[in-house]
Image (tube, rainbow, N blue to C red):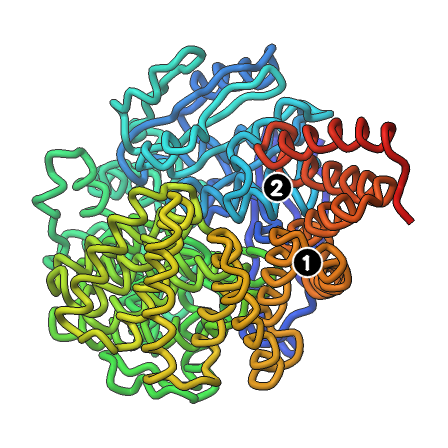
Amino acid sequence: MPIDGRASGQGRVFQTSGDQHIEEHHHHYGAGTGSLLAPQPVGPRPPHGATVPDSVRVPLVGRAPGILRDRADLMERLRAAVTGPGGDVHVLHGLGGCGKTAVAHALFTEAVRDHGRVGLWVNASERISLRAGMLAVAGDRGATTGELAAAASGQRAAADLVWHYLDHSAQRWLLVLDNADDPTVLEEGGWLRTSPLGTVLVTTRHATSPLWRGIGSARHPVGVLPEADAAQVLCDLAPDAGTVESAQKVARRLGCLPLALTLAGSHLSHQLLESWSMDEYDRKLSEDSTALVDQGAAGTGSGQSRHLVGRTWQLSLDALAGQGLPEATALLRLLSCWAADPVPLSLLMPVARGEVDFGHLDPPLAADRVEPALRGLLDHSLIGMVEADGRRCVQAHGVLLDSVAAGVPEVQRGVLAEAAGRLLEAALPQEEDTSAEARAELSLMASHVSSLLGRLPGEGTARLAVRVVRQVFNVSEFAVALGMAHPVADTVEQLFGEEHPVALDARDVAGQALFRMGHYVRSEATHRKVLASRERVLGADHPDTLRSYVALQAPLDLLDRDEEAVGLLRHAIAGQRRVLGEDSAETLASRSLLLDKLPQLGRLEEFHAEVAVIADCERYLPPDHLTTLTARLNYGAGLRQFGLYAEAEPVARRVLADWIRLQGPDHPLALASLSLTALVAHGLGKYGEAIAALQELIERRERVLGTQHPFVVENREWLAEWRAEGEARPDRP
């Protein structure tokens, strides 16, 4: 029986004689509405050391259809997998824009809402987003802050940690790995696995990868919609814009591509100044002469989707220009310089505040037009609002961004690259900042810098990319830095040659990342090549050349070539004293390394002579500088190696307290200080104290590094030996 319903204000009444599914998206900009760019209250920040976002429970997708058309059979198969025993991988493959993510979103929603599954969503488009998302999954399933920090710094296998917690989850789950268009991102490190406790769903454009053919994997092609269903998508989104027959014509012209249909329907249903019918929209499509198919993509099957999406976004931008918002074009072109990952709104604040002048863009982007342009792009579904790591962000589909970037006039490319680079550089944390906040900011920015270099290569973007790789390394994301460093270095070398200073900087970071990840031979080879080039191009006393000497000695030390390592280090220190000065932080850091190297060669007198570096650090560096703490730690370890336990004891106690105070008890150097404290107590015959410290060390290292880490195995051997010694000999007074 019909119900007479009324609505007031912003309420709605929906009535039907059959089933209906309603999904509405509202953007309210009335009086009192806060600015999109204004600061917003956020929830609690992650604990100290957290590097992963808080968004794996929410699919970070720009658009999801209210009604999923022509996917009933596929959804039934996927639904059976989710509700079944688990332990399998399902791969949705097809050309870009065919709705793979829409299917995954629908299954995710059902799994959580109807089947009690924990839904976990990870962006697998790039290594850094995959790694950050999977570590967030581990944190969601119970991993501790210490374990996550160890995985992030390369001290524990990250993929093993994630799958350990997935395999021991208290609840069954569905894990979506979205936009895995480069299967090697999943293959390297073994991120794609199966578990009896859940189902993995992958979306990808890559249909033939051997990775999808493993045991427990099922592939599902996802294509364009049948014409009738495509037309119904348009009618769902814009029911008042025309008949089913008119919708079929538009759908046919759009190639029945779900993404293009969504954009077209949103355009038709959100018009303000004009009100086109579907027939008029179809005629506009016929009149458009600018959409071109990327001939290089024609053979891959993705050219058609890019061609059609390109037509649709340009129509929407033309409509916005007709409404007095030509700045929307400039803003979307700016966004197209970056990656398809969330873009923090704070990145655009310098433009909105007038701190940078983008009046030279075409169309110009004035400060007071940034927010209206954002609103226009939101209203036309060209971007979506998402949240990542507690930050409000905008996000556009990758195919859309590719199409926009391809349509930028040649004369504007360099101007856009400079503008996009300035904004990214302004948003980066200070280079010396290694805090958890800096780590989170770099996680959001890194993919955008890589994308900028790929889309608009130049010396400015190359320098920026190398800076970001180095900062990622400096916040102890060694595995991520290694994954980024080689592609960046390859690109820079292709642009400027192997001996360009920026290319050498990129290879230098790659060599340091190789060292931290335990690839000592490759690290040595990389650093030797960089050193030879820097000596030839920059000269022996250039600061970068001297840094290469310091970098090369590190892998040599661990390859048991101590004499050569010390010789390189002394050569670097002599040059740094001449060029940088005695009070330079770099000079002091290099000198502090001698306190670690000389005891290995048994050079006691030289060791005592170098101890003066600690006083120099205290004199020239700020209080609690990490170089000073490291120098003290190396000094205490050296005293112990020389058997000077009584002198080492107060040093060990002090550095342990300092590292715990400044970095927390599970920081690698805090654990090294605890190890030193235990060894010194053992050397003094204080077996009870030594065993207690060693037991604490083992407990912490097991939690952070895992039970099979070599450090843990060695510490357990010490514990057995010390207990036997303690029973044979009582503690010395």
Q: Specify the quadrant of the image occupied by residue 504.
A: bottom left
Residue at 48% of width from left, 64% of height from top? 594
Residue 714 at what x, y percent from top left? 63, 32
Residue at 55% of width from left, 55% of height from top? 388
Label 1 – label 2 distance at C-alpha: 21 Å
Residue 369 at what x, y percent from top left? 41, 82
Can residue 267 be seen here?
Answer: no
What is the number of the mark on residue 398? none
Q: Name the residue under label 1.
A: 48
Residue 93 at what x, y percent from top left? 33, 27
Q: What residue type is labelled 1?
A: His
Is label 1 in a helix, a strand or a loop? loop
Residue at 37% of width from left, 60% of height from top? 469
Residue 439 at what x, y percent from top left? 54, 60
Is label 2 in a helix, a strand or a loop? loop
Q: What residue type is labelled 2?
A: Arg
Residue density around tag 2, few if under 14, some if 14–19, many if 20 or more, within 10 Å = some
Can residue 285 be seen here?
Answer: yes
